[in-house]
Image (spheres, rainbow, N blue to C red):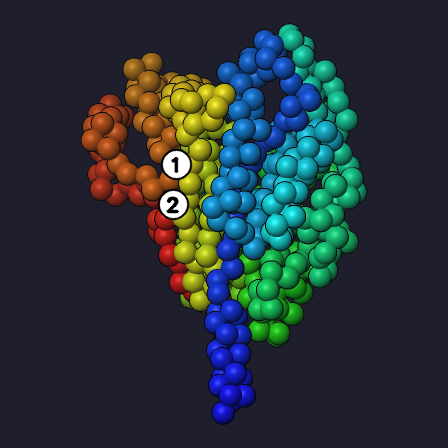
Amino acid sequence: MRYIIFYILLILSLGLSASQPLKIGVISDTHYLSERLMDDGNAINNYIASSGKNIKAVPQVLDQVLAYYNENKPLDILLVSGDMTKDGEKQSHLDFRARLKPLQDRGTKVFVIPGNHDINMPNAVRFEGDKAEPVDNVSPQEFADIYKDCGYGTALKRDTASLSYVAQLDNSTWLLAIDVARYKEYTTRSLSSGKLSPETEKWVIEILDEAKEKNIQVLGMMHWGLVEHIMYQSTFFKDYLVDDWQRLAPLFADKGMKAIFTGHFHANDITAFTSDKGNTIYDIETGTLCSYPFSYRSIDYSPTSMNISTFNVMSIPQDPSLGVNNKIRMEQLSERLATQKIRNMGFGLPDTVVSRMAKVMGQVFVQHAYGDEKMTDDMRKWIQQLSLTLDSPVDTNDIELDFFPADNNVTITF
């Protein structure tokens, strides 16, 4: 009888352990610059003011995020969906990799994929005083060597035409990390757009078909967005979507991919896309750690669902008001960029109209960066006034600021 009870308890314990969800952390667009490559001079402060990327704060922000994962939420998996470094500095990659090691030493598996700021960067620099001086960047092979313990050295399979690979997360789940960066084309500058080559697409489809045969669920990871996350993104911000996304999104969905983790747009957003055949894929885009709202995610994953939680770094020792200060900076920068974009469209609008449009667009972008956007009374009023000015009435109830589902804290079922 004792042996029967023992075996029953053993079987039950194995069943319970097998049903435990994978704990997955997600960060993106850290734009980490090694502390060895920057001081507090005019050059770096001017860069921060013009770009909105608070790269001086990133080391402390990243340390806080990794400490959370290490101490409060022990992880099985950490996904890093590209743009690890400011501009592909070799020293930044080496130091970023070193910061991940304590997490890995506790058993967390880390997987990375390059973005448009990681490899063959022509403008890798260090900031010293009033000057920005060139430093070494990394080649594709050097990138794979540096991150050999972050996917490339433990991959089940690697694509020969890119830095794409497939890795095992558990017995029933694969991670398909898809490299669509165009670093082979860089000359004097990087390219913001991403493109899946025919060779890599063929390899991706083969992996998805093999997974389906083996009853393996596939999660994707890619720096560029697979679907639109905001109205008219493909019109105004097409470089933040992978090229030919209208074809690739239904293709991936119909081949069985349930979710893909992305970044690039520096916004925290989740969008569900359903193909004509009725298959749904979720594009889970994670915001940046170099500007407001300094977002990172924690996910409990099972083959049937994902429970997604989102956190934000609002304060660091170097800047107790980090969140507030950077939100103001982002609002100002977004309004300025919106003004420039509207004027470049050549409509010849009066300055008062341009100002109203830019204010609305700036507020929308800041809300989009945080996620779970909502139309405010002021935004509604400005849009109505703008529509009257342009003699083009708009029903603000028809404006969809945030696509389904929720962006920050949500449970997704497959």
Question: Quick check: can you spot residue 162?
Answer: no
The disc placed on residue 370 is: 1
Q: Where is mark 2, residue-wise?
A: 408
Q: Secondary structure at mark 2?
A: loop
In this rendering, position of residue 7 left or right of residue 356: right
Picture coordinates of residue 78 (x, y %)?
A: 57, 49
Asked if residue 46 is positioned above or below residue 98 in the image, the reply reads above
In this rendering, position of residue 284 left or right of residue 90: left
Question: Quick check: can you spot residue 393?
Answer: yes
- In the picture, the quarter occupied by the C terminus is bottom left
3D distance between C-alphas at marks 1 and 2: 8 Å
Q: Nearer the viewer, residue 127 or 362?
A: 127
Q: Are marks 1 and 2 in contact (CB under 8 Å)?
A: yes
Q: Secondary structure at mark 1?
A: helix
Extreme-bottom residue of the structure: 1
Name the kind of residue labelled 1 in the image.
Answer: Tyr
Residue drawn at x 68%, y 21% as measured from the top left: 37
Classed neighbour count for the residue bearing mark 2: other residues with Cα under 10 Å, few (<14), some (14–19), many (≥20): many
Instruction: Report the label total.
Output: 2
Asked if residue 390 is positioned above or below residue 227 in the image, the reply reads above
Residue drawn at x 48%, y 72% as measured from the top left: 16
Picture coordinates of residue 405 (x, y %)?
A: 36, 52
Q: Nearer the viewer, residue 361 or 215?
A: 215
Residue drawn at x 72%, y 34% as measured from the top left: 94
Residue drawn at x 49%, y 92% as measured from the top left: 1
The disc placed on residue 143 is: none
Picture coordinates of residue 2 (x, y %)?
A: 51, 88
Asked if residue 406 is positioned above or below residue 90 in the image, the reply reads below
Name the kind of residue labelled 2 in the image.
Answer: Asn
Classed neighbour count for the residue bearing mark 1: other residues with Cα under 10 Å, few (<14), some (14–19), many (≥20): many
Picture coordinates of residue 288 (x, y %)?
A: 50, 35
